[in-house]
Image: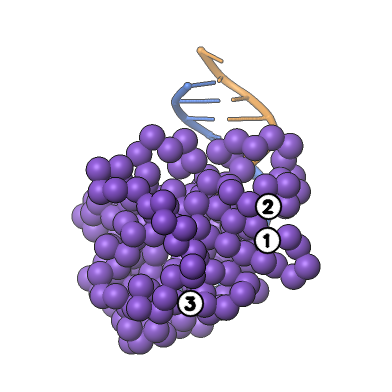
Chain colours: A purple, B blue, C orange
Amino acid sequence: MKLSYDFYRRKDVVGISRDLLGKVLCTRIGDDPLTAGIITETEAYCGRDDLACHANGGLRTDRTEIMYGPGGHAYIYLCYGIHHLFNVVTNREGLADAILVRAVQPVEGTETMLLRRGREKTDPALTAGPGRLTQALGITTKLYGVDLRGDTIWIEDRGDSPDANGIAATERVGVDYAGEHALRKWRFHIKKNPWVT
DNA sequence: CATTTGATGTTCT
DNA sequence: GAACATCAAATGC
């Protein structure tokens, strides 16, 4: 079943990041077949007191605007001019918290993912990595702000989430400019799962 | 294996 | 003009 607005609108973005592991990210883009993958790696970003977050200090631009809306929407932006990165907006309206999905494990529509990625073999390079999974699932900035309770992008709970002992917490990556905030262990992945970065 | 480099849009200085 | 929540291909061991 699809995750509820209540799930997305909880206050603890770090806790939601942990809970997203094992959930299934699904997309149906245009006339393409459904594609879906188990979320194996996430990173939390908090809009307040977190130098690594795009919306730190109440920064409000066309790009960050959706993060200030209520949880349960997609924050998608272009990174390094090339990669579309997918985030889940959380918390209530006015608080800009979001979770970056960094890797998934394919479960449905693998053939479609291979086509979109221009690859022949199904291995972790297909969907492990924030820029890779968006390409595999057909996510682009055209889908900026879509409602995750709609039928284009959504997340399902299929009842196979890892228990607390199966989750590893590590430092976030690629955010050295955030100083000591970069050292927060707000990156989570499923232990012993090869579909991570 | 490790390291380097090119691709390249949005935002901020 | 510089920096940036990255990736893939090329180069050097």
Given residues A94 and A70, the one toward you in this image is A70
Where disc 1 sits, the SS reads loop
Residue highlighted by disc 3:
A73
Q: Earlier in the sequence, mark 1 or mark 3?
A: 1
Kindly indicate whether the residues beneath marks 2 and 3 are on one polypeptide chain. Answer: yes
Q: Give, as a three-letter code, the residue at label 2.
A: Gly
Q: How busy is the neighbourhood of tag 1: few (under 14 within 10 Å), some, or many (20 plus)?
A: some
Residue A65 visible in the shown view: yes
Q: In whole angstroms, how far apart are the C-alphas of marks 1 and 2?
A: 6 Å
Q: How busy is the neighbourhood of tag 2: few (under 14 within 10 Å), some, or many (20 plus)?
A: some
Q: In whole angstroms, how far apart are the C-alphas of marks 1 and 3?
A: 19 Å
Q: Give, as a three-letter code, the residue at label 3.
A: His
On screen, residue A141 versus residue A177, left or right, reads right
Residue highlighted by disc 2:
A109
Q: Earlier in the sequence, mark 1 or mark 2?
A: 1
Q: How busy is the neighbourhood of tag 3: few (under 14 within 10 Å), some, or many (20 plus)?
A: many
On screen, residue A56 versus residue C11, left or right, reads left
Asked if labels 3 and 1 touch by Cβ distance under 8 angstroms, the answer is no
Residue A34's disc is: 1
Where disc 2 sits, the SS reads loop
Kindly indicate whether the residues beneath marks 1 and 2 are on one polypeptide chain. Answer: yes
